[in-house]
Image (cartoon, rainbow, N blue to C red):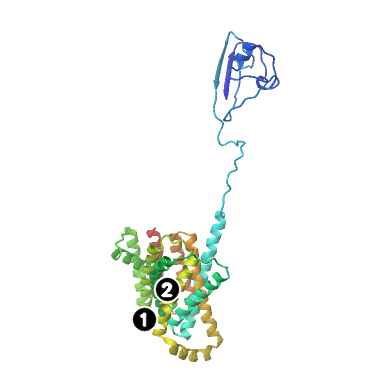
Amino acid sequence: MICSVKQFSPMTTAGSEIFLRPQSRSPIQQSLLLPSLSIEKPKRSSISVQKPLHVSMVGDSNGGFGFLKARRSSIQCEAYEADRSEPIETNIELPKAEGPSEAAKKLKIGIYFAMWWALNVVFNIYNKKVLNAYPYPWLTSTLSLACGSLIMLISWATRIAEAPKTDFEFWKALFPVAVAHTIGHVAATVSMSKVAVSFTHIIKSGEPAFSVLVSRFLLGESFPMPVYLSLIPIIGGCSLAALTELNFNMIGFMGAMISNLAFVFRNIFSKRGMKGKSVSGMNYYACLSILSLVILTPFAIAVEGPQMWAAGWEKAFPQLGSQLLWWMVAQSVFYHLYNQVSYMSLDEISPLTFSVGNTMKRISVIVSSIIIFHTPVQPVNALGAAIAVFGTFIYSQAKQ
């Protein structure tokens, strides 16, 4: 409360005494002093208001403090609310901020990305070693899905991971996603069995081009002009890398192309059919692996079969011994782990960040495979790969 009192009396006293010190005044003085407040107790007056008020001053026209005379006095009183940001004594406790801090969240995402890239590199190395010694991509694909399914079933049974709550509608919506995932997985493995890992991933970096073309001509979706322009370096880089590939193989090339197309449909089916299904990324991929295993197993038996597998084992095992078995286990485990971590990462980050991370993952796989397997690379071939990967990065920026 801002109060100013104008009077012409020479008498002065402290402003706080008006409220706190008991005074013996006449009724006239009391009524003229504060007409809106009544002093009921003789010892100490009290003021009760609903909102906190500030009292600035009670003074005369000359700037001093004093009592008011009855005849010549004027009172000016103004009030304003206290700043609402000031602490107020209440029994209400403000809720504390929940969840991890921003630094902890960034650290978690960084760990996910590092694991994703590292596990993917290790998988590709062991997968290529198995396919070089035991060239049965359908069986290799089946084993990787079977291993992941077994890991998740054990995790659910032992309550290491919480089992998802699914129904018939969930599996019905997941079925086309699993079909596309199965085709893409087998096609990529067939490609790696025929050509270098680096070449397969260079061709697979052209997946955004398939995504735009399928969405535009089959689904009728339109994109901004920068998205279409970003396809030029992707298509041009992949073409340049394919034309200059020293170990070019048509089956390997077509396998990578089919894998791109299948994974585009997988993403489309997943986006449309799985909308509203509340399943975590880890459990979503586990269910996808189980259903894909069910779909793939009869086809793997029909295409290759136990007789071919046994004949290949009798040829490869004497040369490598238990090392071959270790390679098969490693490629199966790391395949599941890197895919699981990638889906867990997608729960924590935006699609744009995921696309950038996927681009960087391909670079790490291409470079590491060239170093480990001593893949011969011509300068023009390396330039084509760089252009294709850079185009993928530009696409991820333009798409958002």
- Can residue 4 be seen here? yes
Of the two numbered discs 2 and 1 on the same chain, state the one appearing first in sequence.
Answer: 2
Residue in the foreground of this view, choosing between 256 and 269:
269
Q: Kindly identify the residue that appears in the image at 38 percent across and 72 percent down.
A: 180
Q: Are marks 2 and 1 in contact (CB under 8 Å)?
A: no
| Percent position of residue 78, x then y | 54, 22
Give the residue type that dot 2 points to.
His
Q: Which disc is residue 251 wearing?
A: 1
Tell me the mark number nearer the camera, choosing from 2 and 1: 1
- Residue 326 versus residue 385 in the image, above or below: below
| Percent position of residue 153, x then y | 52, 72
- Can residue 381 be seen here? no
Q: Secondary structure at mark 1?
A: helix
- In the image, taking residue 49 as reference, residue 134 lies left or right, namely left
Q: Kindly identify the residue that appears in the image at 61 percent across and 14 percent down.
A: 31
Identify residue for label 2. 201
Residue in the foreground of this view, choosing between 52 and 246:
52
- Residue 48 versus residue 66 in the image, above or below: below
Give the residue type that dot 1 points to.
Ile
